[in-house]
Every structure is written in structure tokens, then in C-alpha cells.
Image (cartoon, helix red, strand yellow):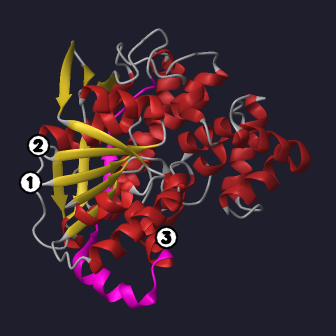
Amino acid sequence: MKALHFGAGNIGRGFIGKLLADAGIELVFADVNQVVLDALNARHEYPVRVVGEQANVEMVRGVSAINSTSDAVITQVAEADLVTTAVGPQILERIASGIAHGLLKRHEAGNTRPLNIIACENMVRGTSQLKQHVLKTLPASSHAWVEQHVGFVDSAVDRIVPPSEAGSSDPLEVTVETFSEWIVDKTQFVGTPPTIPGMELTDNLIAFVERKLFTLNTGHAITAYLGQRAGHATIREAILDAQVRSVVQGAMQESGAVLIQRYGFDAEKHAAYIQKILTRFENPYLKDDVERVGRQPLRKLSAGDRLIKPLLGTLEYQLPHDNLVQGIAAAMHYRSEADPQAQELAALLAEKGPQATLAQISGLDANSDVVSSVVSAYHAMA
């Protein structure tokens, strides 16, 4: 079995690429980082440091790499059985053209083997969005063939992979936590889904997508925003602060109440899931900066993302949301010289004030009680 994986960054190498290679799949990475590409092609292996209660190094072997802007992508897509991505939500549109041209070449060559494409991104229904970008690039005459022979399979992914530590001289070395979760929508495959240890099939993906978004992503973001306010540098430092932890845990319990109401999750199991995530944030081996985790606050404050979406759920079911309000207010205070979105947020706040800014970013009613609550919390933090 052949797989092409877009994205040879830390998540690509440390999570999805590792699972594919460990399953014995012939794996080719596609990326634009020439240093990483050259190292992969010279060595065909790389070390992954897996850290939890203890740390151990696992070698990923039998891999190669191509430049994702080259015509080699077209050839690989034309011959692959599986295409995966870990490139970031904004990059999906950029890789769609290469995938589309590969599908055309596949069609012209008469290759009718099933091809399944799975975007493994930190977003809801990322593969469905990638599909729309691909179809836009393809001639309408090829759409029916694509629908018949190509599966666009949505997934939910969860593994904390911090940036490489400064001082590491190996461009391929990556550190990951022990925990990982890759859940895919089995109803969207064309042909028989592949057997890949670590990939879990479900027919109710949205429940797991929202479980991860409302718990891991919500908690991670609020830890970062409150952590920055409190002067902490890392997620571990922040979550070990009792005041930060209280709000983070409270927010995850509030968002969890929405999930339990909406999807019928078992309350005790969900409480254990929340505790597991708090333990993951405490991992002493993961040096994850609050500034990195908090970046792109405009996206994280949008209606469909990790802060506002669970809040909307609490409004829908008339549930408490005081801790989520605190997290949203802290997000509005996030600042980073290295993040254009943080600078745009600061400019909006200076120009329009918190009430109009929050309404514009989130889609919430500027005159609603919940916006008033966030604005009060925002001023209290100032």
C-alpha cells in the first residue's frame, strides 16, 4: 500500500506519518522545507521521542520525500492508495491543485483502484473543505469519476506535538506525547477502509470532532490565554497555577455539559476524559509555549471554533458558562509580536472597543447578555 502525506513538519512526522509508516505502508512525504526533504531522502528514517511517564525514542523507517510544489506530487497522487495531510487549515487550498492534477492523471491512466484522502487538520470537516478546493480545480466532466473512485474522508485528530527544542541539531527529530487519537468517518471511504493501528473508525464523527474541539482545544486555548495573563511561559506552568486550572477545568465541564446533552456521552467517562486532558497539559516533557498555543485569536474566537461554539451550545441548552466567558475575555487580551492576528485583534479593540470587536469576530449579538458578560470580564482583567 502506498501513501502520500502532505506536511513533513512536527505533526506530520510525529503523528500521522509515524502511524502510516509503523503500519508498513510505503510512505512519501510532500513538503516545501528543503532541509527536511533532503534529510528524509538521505536517511529514509527519523527519530520520534515519545514522552509520558517516561521518555523513549522510536525510529520511523522506510520513508522518502518530494517537494509539494513539484510535478512529482501529480505522479504520487496518480499512484497512491491513500493521501493524508497535516499542513494547517490555511494551506489546504494551496495543495488542492496538485491533488486535482494527480486525480486527472489517475483517470487518464485508467487507474480505478480506490483512493482515499484524509485531511488530518485541527479543524471541523477539513477533508470536506479540501474536497471543495479540489473539485473547483477539476473540470466538471471529471467530477463523476472522482465521486466513484475517490473517498474524501473526514477525521478528528488529537496529539500534542510541541515545536522542536532549540539546540537540537537534527532537523528530523520530533517530540510527541504518548496519547494520540485519530478518528475517521468510515461512511466516507471508497472501497474497504485500510487497517492502520491507531486509526479508529466511527459512523458518528461529528460527536468526536466536537468532543475534541470542546475539551482539548477549548482547554488548551484557555490555559494559554489565562497563562499569558498570569505571566506563565508554558502550558505546564499555567495549568499548575490553581487559579488558571480552576477556570480551565470549569470551562471544560461547561462545554462537556453541552456534549452530554447533545450526543448522550456518558457523564462519568467524559469527566475522566477531562482529567486525562489536564494530565496531558501537565506533561513535564512537553515544553509548549502559551504564546504558540494562543496564536490566531481571531480564528479561535470565530463562531465555529473552540471558544464561541461551546458557548453557543450552553446558550442553546440554557447551561452555565461563567468559565467559558472568562476564557473568551482572556483571549481578547492575548498579545504576540509574532502573530498578525494578535496585532489585528489589538487594533480592532483600540478602534471599536471590546463589545463591537467581539460581535464582529464571533458573530454574537453585540447587545446580548453574554457579550455584556464577556465585556465585563474583559474590563475586570484589564
Q: What element carries label 3?
A: helix
Q: Nearer the viewer, mark 1 or mark 2?
A: 2
Is the Cβ of the residue at disc 1 closer than 8 Å to that at disc 2?
yes
- Quarter of the figure with residue 161: top left
How far apart, in angstroms, are the residues tagged by discs 3 and 1? 28 Å
Q: Mark 3 points at which residue?
A: 133
Q: Which residue lies furthest to the top in this view?
A: 167
Is the Cβ of the residue at disc 3 closer than 8 Å to that at disc 1?
no
Name the residue rendered at 8%, 54% in the picture.
Answer: 195
How far apart, in angstroms, are the residues tagged by discs 1 and 2? 8 Å
Name the residue rendered at 24%, 83% in the picture.
Answer: 148
Q: Can residue 237 be seen in this view?
A: yes
Q: Residues within 10 Å of mark 3 (few under 14, many from 20)?
A: some
Please state if 346 lies on the left or on the right of 187 as rendered. right
Judge whether residue 181 is colored magenta.
no
Counting residues from the start of the chain, the first of labels 3 and 1 encountered is 3
Q: Mark 1 points at which residue?
A: 195
Q: Residues within 10 Å of mark 1 (few under 14, many from 20)?
A: few
Q: Is mark 1 on a helix, strand or loop?
A: loop
